[in-house]
Image (tube, helix red, strand yellow):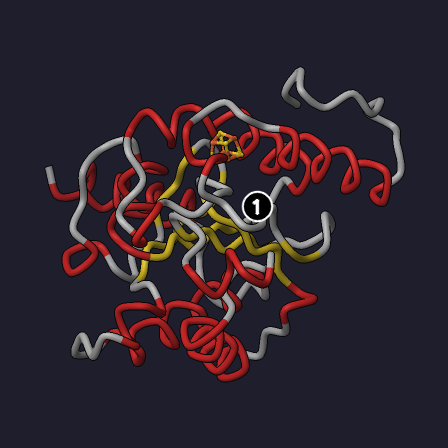
Amino acid sequence: MGSDLTAPANASPARLKRELERAVRACTACGLHQGRTTPVVGEGSFDARLMIVGSKPRRHEDLQGRPFAGGTGNVLDQAMQVAGLARSDVYLTTLVKCRPEDDRPASTHEVEACGQLFRAQLQLVRPEVVVALGSFAASVLLRRPVSIERVAGYRLDVQGVTLIPTYHPADAVRGVPQAAVTLRRDLSAAKAVLDGRLPTGAQTLAELRSRTAVGS
Ligand code: SF4
């Protein structure tokens, strides 16, 4: 956990949540704090096995202080419902916690500045599966530039966590073809991994390696 958070490791989830929210509200580590209405920390249970990660709060989230509000939230909620997931089953958050002005993409500096808070959330939740919404979040979490058109739906292994990149619900709101249907498919895949009906990222990687070894 980041040194910004002062609760002891055995603190209750409620106290850890308060500490995290306090740390985010007090944060001035990058210029985004100047334009925010409300920082958007995250939502859901620290016991969630699935974490859904977007890149940044947008206008509705900034006004409401909740991740994935407004039209994007409706699209995400519908996709989760199709997948058999409720908001209480997941932990929702974004890489940066304050809205960039005019909903521009967050800069590398801003993502790095917010990285300690995001890593603290990862350590608190310890998800088995992470769904990355959109090219930006997928690229940051994979530490290499990727295009969501090419990687959506892959079950990847990132240090023992299954990472599934998919379209951002905002893509569906903008009318990007296949975005909504792919988002539903990939959230359903995340649920299937959690239920043991699909291999994890590590199992998928091991299977690919064994096939490659047999074929060589
Ligand atoms: S975006 Fe993150 S690092 Fe920047 S001010 Fe907000 S909480 Fe702090």
Residue visible at 22% across and 33% down?
144
- Location of the N terminus by quadrant is top right
User: Which is nearer the eye, 150 or 78?
Assistant: 78
Which quadrant would residue 173 be assigned to in this image? bottom left
Residue at the outermost top position: 3
| Pointer 1 residue | 39
Residue at the outermost left position: 216
Q: Answer few, some or many: residues within 10 Å of disc 1's Cα (few below 14, many 20 plus, some between 14 and 19).
A: many
Q: Please state if 15 lies on the left or on the right of 64 as rendered.
A: right
Placement of 131 over or under 181, stated as above or below = above
Residue 47: x, y in percent? 73, 50
The answer to whether the residue bearing label 1 lies less than 8 angstroms from the nearest atom of ligand 1 is yes
The number of numbered badges drawn on the structure is 1
Residue visible at 19% across and 42% down?
214
Element class at badge 1: loop
Placement of 188 over or under 59, stated as above or below = below
Q: Please state if 25 lies on the left or on the right of 40 as rendered.
A: right
Residue 200: x, y in percent? 45, 52
Report the amino acid beneath label 1: Pro
Residue visible at 27% across and 45% down?
105
Placement of 40 over or under 139, stated as above or below = below
User: Which is nearer the eye, 202 or 29?
Assistant: 29
Q: Please state if 143 lies on the left or on the right of 202 as rendered.
A: left
User: Which is nearer the eye, 98 or 150?
Assistant: 98
Residue 75: x, y in percent? 42, 78
Residue 119: x, y in percent? 54, 30
Residue visible at 29% across and 56% down?
134
